[in-house]
């Protein structure tokens, strides 16, 4: 249920309870709204805010947004150790070969799903071509499994939002790498500005959870746990 919030509030109203049991953020009203108000068509808080009640059903006809590849980037960041260096350093690989679509539950509300997202692993590059070739050919076997894919398992996004403001939330879903599908939760920040969504999401993952062997070369080794990050710009698909 989606409610536009009324401009006034009862002075005796108590704070609403925090929460949902899902990993995505919970609907939390302003301190002026009472628990009973969340079940009614009108809740009390700032008139500029929108609140989504727990268990709201996604709208299959909500607006869709398509990722703009040339303005987006996926990257990994891993700790690696060279035999001739005294301390570990960061290895960073990047690609802009990203495609996919997002769908919001309702127009003007930054809450929805990643319907699909696909990253071409064959295009990952870093500052070391030898590392890149080894990762593509041995770790990822990118010729056989060229894409990493993600899709949401439930709606995610802020419960309370004001237009143009950046919001912080989680995106739970399923990630497939090298044919292995695993649950993952992204820590995300995003902003809805008219017909454009700008956001970034990151997650700490272990390569071995996806059946991947951390790179081991004669001159370097890469740690099992690393950070995956995706920065996207997505534009509304005309209806």
Image (spheres, rainbow, N blue to C red):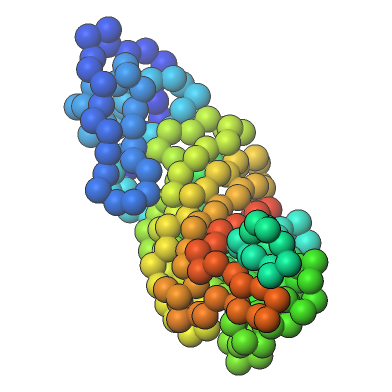
In this image, 51 relative to 215: left or right? left
Q: Nearer the viewer, residue 216 or 233?
A: 216
* Relative image position of residue 226 (x, y in whole percent): 54, 62
Q: Nearer the viewer, residue 142 or 200?
A: 142
Q: Write the residue at 44% across / 40% down.
A: 158
Say which quarter of the image contains residue 153: bottom left
Number of labels in the image equals 0
* Relative image position of residue 201 (x, y in whole percent): 56, 53
Say which quarter of the image contains residue 52: top left
Q: Write the residue at 76% across / 56% down.
A: 71
Q: Nearer the viewer, residue 8 or 229?
A: 229
Say which quarter of the image contains residue 19: top left
Residue 229 against residue 143 in the figure, above or below: above
Quadrant of the image containing the C terminus:
bottom right
Q: Write the residue at 55% across / 76% down.
A: 214
* Relative image position of residue 8 (x, y in whole percent): 37, 13
Quadrant of the image containing the N terminus:
top left
Q: Residue furthest left?
A: 36
Residue 177 against residue 143 in the figure, above or below: above
In this image, 36 relative to 118: left or right? left
Asked if residue 159 shows in the view, the reply is: yes
In this image, 183 relative to 77: left or right? left
Q: Residue furthest top?
A: 11
Asked if residue 237 shows in the view, the reply is: no
Q: Nearer the viewer, residue 206 or 48?
A: 206
Q: Write the residue at 60% across / 77% down.
A: 215
């Amino acid at each position: 249920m989606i409610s536009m919030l009324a401009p006034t509030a009862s002075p005796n109203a108590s704070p609403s309870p925090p929460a949902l049991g899902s990993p995505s953020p919970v609907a939390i009203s302003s301190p002026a709204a009472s628990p009973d108000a969340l079940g009614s068509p009108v809740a009390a808080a700032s008139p500029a805010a929108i609140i989504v009640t727990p268990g709201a059903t996604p709208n299959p006809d909500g607006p869709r947004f398509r990722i703009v590849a040339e303005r987006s980037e996926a990257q990994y960041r891993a700790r690696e150790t060279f035999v001739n260096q005294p301390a570990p350093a960061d290895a960073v690989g990047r690609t802009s070969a990203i495609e996919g679509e997002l769908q919001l539950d309702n127009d003007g509300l930054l809450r929805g799903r990643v319907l699909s997202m696909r990253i071409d692993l064959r295009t990952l590059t870093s500052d070391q071509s030898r590392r890149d070739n080894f990762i593509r050919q041995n770790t990822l076997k990118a010729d056989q499994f060229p894409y990493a894919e993600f899709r949401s398992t439930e709606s995610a996004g802020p419960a309370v939002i004001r237009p143009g403001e950046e919001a912080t939330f989680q995106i739970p879903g399923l990630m497939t790498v090298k044919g292995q599908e695993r649950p993952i939760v992204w820590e995300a920040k995003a902003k809805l500005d008219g017909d454009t969504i700008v956001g970034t999401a990151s997650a700490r993952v272990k390569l071995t959870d996806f059946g991947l062997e951390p790179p081991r070369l004669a001159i370097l080794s890469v740690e099992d746990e690393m950070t995956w990050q995706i920065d996207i710009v997505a534009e509304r698909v005309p209806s």
